[in-house]
Image (tube, rainbow, N blue to C red):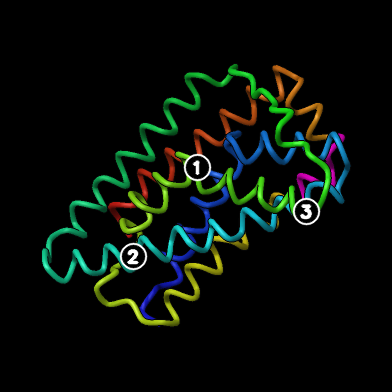
Amino acid sequence: MTISAADMALYVGALFALFLTPGPVWVALIARTLSGGFNAAWPLALGVVVGDVLWPLLAILGVSWIVSVYADFMVVLRGVASVTFLVMGWLIIRHADRDVSTNSRLTRPGMWAGFMAGLAVILGNPKAILFYMGVLPGFFDLGAMTRLDIVAICTASFAVPLIGNLILAFFFGRARRLLTSPAALRRTNRIAGGLLIAVGLAIPFV
């Protein structure tokens, strides 16, 4: 493997910060958890896994080809990644009081319905698309990446949000209070925004 422990730790930290940021996956997960409990939510979490593996894989393969043509492309991407995290963190803190709404179409019963809902949410999630296609390449040297590196990145990309989603679904009662309490939502958004800013500041130095 060519990936350093520091690079992987920073990437895992970024994944965790993004997980803490309420978005479409949170909406879908909470909606299904509140309607059918943990058994209704875990298939959705597995559907999200598909996108969390697909997006980084497409990003790595696509950007690796670009790097083979334009050698300085990674330097530009590292700067883009840093700025993107700083802007995202600032916007989240600025709108820390914004509520997360639910969608009843996500609560259809059945394992297959839950899985497909998770897949649809992650494939159409602008936060995931922005991160994996535009930010992930800024963390690693894709030109020197091996198969083991790709496996490690894809594993981290699905493992961090999967564990978080399952824990969130398990404690759906607490999650419900989190979404309905303005103070708790504000605190969560501020923490997530601060973590994103910290990652953005760290990227240029790793």
Is 16 left or right of 60, judged from the image as shown? right
Picture quarter containing residue 104? top right
Q: Amino acid at mark 3?
A: Trp
Q: Which mark is residue 140?
A: 2
Judged by depth in the image, the label closer to the viewer, 2 or 3, is 3
* Mark 1 or 2, nearer chain start: 1
Question: CB atoms at circles 1 and 2 under 8 Å apart?
Answer: no
Q: CA distance from mark 1 to mark 2?
A: 25 Å
Image vertical order of residue 173 relative to residue 2, above or below:
above
Q: Quadrant of the C terminus?
A: bottom left
> Which one is nearer the viewer's eye here, 158 or 61?
61
Boundaries of the magenta span: 166-173
Residue name at image x 50 percent, y 67 percent: 154
Q: Please state the horizontal and vertical placement of residue 166, each as a whole percent of the image.
A: 76, 52
Q: Amino acid at mark 2?
A: Phe
Is 46 left or right of 33, judged from the image as shown? left
Callout 2 crowding tier (Cα within 10 Å): few <14, some 14–19, many ≥20 = many
Residue name at image x 68 percent, y 38 percent: 28
Q: CA distance from mark 2 to mark 3?
A: 31 Å
For label 3, the SS is helix
For mark 3, what is the residue? 42
* Mark 1 or 3, nearer chain start: 3
* Mark 2 or 3, nearer chain start: 3
For label 2, the SS is loop
For mark 1, what is the residue? 124
Q: Quadrant of the N terminus?
A: bottom left
